[in-house]
Structure formats: structure tokens, C-alpha cells
Image (cartoon, helix red, strand yellow):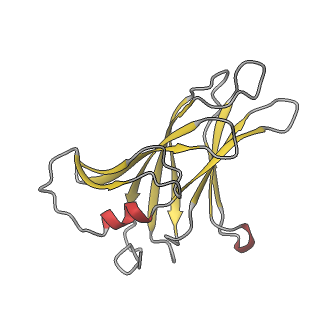
Amino acid sequence: MDGILGLLKLRIKKGVSLAIRDTRSSDPYVVVTMGDQIYILMQKLKTGVVKDTRNPEWDEELTLSIRDVNTPIHLEVFDKDTFTVDDKMGNAEIDIKPYLECLKMNLTNNLSNGCVVKRIDADGKNYLVEESCCIWNNGKITQQMTLALRNVECGYVVVEIEWREIPGSKGLSEVEL
């Protein structure tokens, strides 16, 4: 676990109005990557394929080991093809620093469930479609976000993130955000 700050659970919830890459629809899936292939620290995870839809419901959990809070998380949506290379359907990035700032507040358990800890505005620099909130629920902070896909004519992906500490890891205490 050397060098790992913690784990980030990504729940890839759904896609909305994704691009058509087959005759009338698509068979979308999401690939999540973080890190750099040059240093062999890249992580690559993917969801299952949902057949024949522009509005897939994945509701899948993927977990990344976080070593560097400055490394963005890349999401890319593809259309699964049988006899040709899978078609690209757009990409997005998640900047986890605003979320991690909430975690570093060291909030107590006196907050009520559903309490908004922080609001992150969609500003054109991030991939957010609308304001995203860090929410306190059952002693944990989660952030749900709707990300606009870029390099494509249309589409959004809804994602939720949640931090998981690893016993014996450095954690976030010494991390500069």
C-alpha cells in the first residue's frame, strides 16, 4: 500500500442522451483511467456494455487507488462493436480536489443526513453540466456530478464519488490541495 493515499469509489450511474453510433442507437460502456502509462502506474477499469440504448443505466462501482490528488480521472464512453473497432462516444474528466477539500474539513457526526457540505459550480473549465454538491450521509461525504462529454455531439454521464481510507496508508492529512 506504499504511496497510496486512499481509495476512491466511483459509482458510474448512467448515461443521458448519448450519441448514436449504430443504426438507431448505441451499445455504450465507460472506460475509467487514471495515471500515466509511461510510469506503469495507470489504472484502467470499465463498466459492462448496455445494449441498444442512448440512456444506459450502469449503476456500477469501480474503485481506484489514489496516489496523487493532482492526477485527473479520465472517463471515456465507447460504443461496443462486434466486427470493427469500438466507436468513441465522448470523454470527460473528474477533478477530485474540490471533493477532497471537503474531506479535509474533518467534520463531526453531528451533521444531519443530506446536509450540503460544499457546492461546486459548473464553470466551463470543469466538465460539470450543473452545480455539484458534496453531501453528508451516514458519516460519509459523497459527491454526485453530471459530466458533459466532450469531443462528441451530445451526451452526459452521471457519476458519484466516495473516499475510502486504507488502514496504514498516508491518508489525506499531509496532502496539499
- In the depicted view, which residue is nearer to us: 66 or 93? 93
Image point 37% across, 69% down: which residue? 167
Q: Choose between 138 and 155: the one closer to the eye.
A: 155
Q: Determine which quarter of the picture holds residue 84.
A: top right
Residue 77 pos. (x, y %): 66, 41
Q: Is residue 163 left or right of residue 156?
A: left
Horizontally, residue 169 falls left or right of residue 53, namely left
- Most distant residue in the top direction: 24
In the image, taking residue 25 as reference, residue 98 lies left or right, namely: left
Q: Position of residue 18 (x, y in %)?
A: 62, 31
Residue 159 location, x and y as percent?
Answer: 47, 44
Whether residue 76 is visible, yes or no, is no
Which residue is the extreme one toward the left?
110
Answer with the quarter of the image where residue 114 lies: top left
Q: Residue 120 is drawn in which quadrant?
A: bottom left
Query: What is the tally of numbered marks visible in this picture?
Result: 0
* Foreground of the two, 121 or 87: 121
Q: Residue 128, can we see it? A: yes
Residue drawn at (70%, 70%) of the image? 40
Image quarter (top left, top right, bottom left or bottom right) of the C terminus: bottom left
Please say if 62 is above or below 95: above
Residue at image coords 26%, 68%:
105
Provide residue 45's location: percent of width, then percent of height. Answer: 62, 50
Find the residue positioned furthest to the right: 83
Q: Is residue 134 above or below residue 27?
A: below
| Along the viewing direction, whichever of 173 and 146 lies nearer the viewer | 146
Above or below for 153 versus 102: above
> Which residue lies at the image location 49% right of the left edge and 72% below the top edge?
4
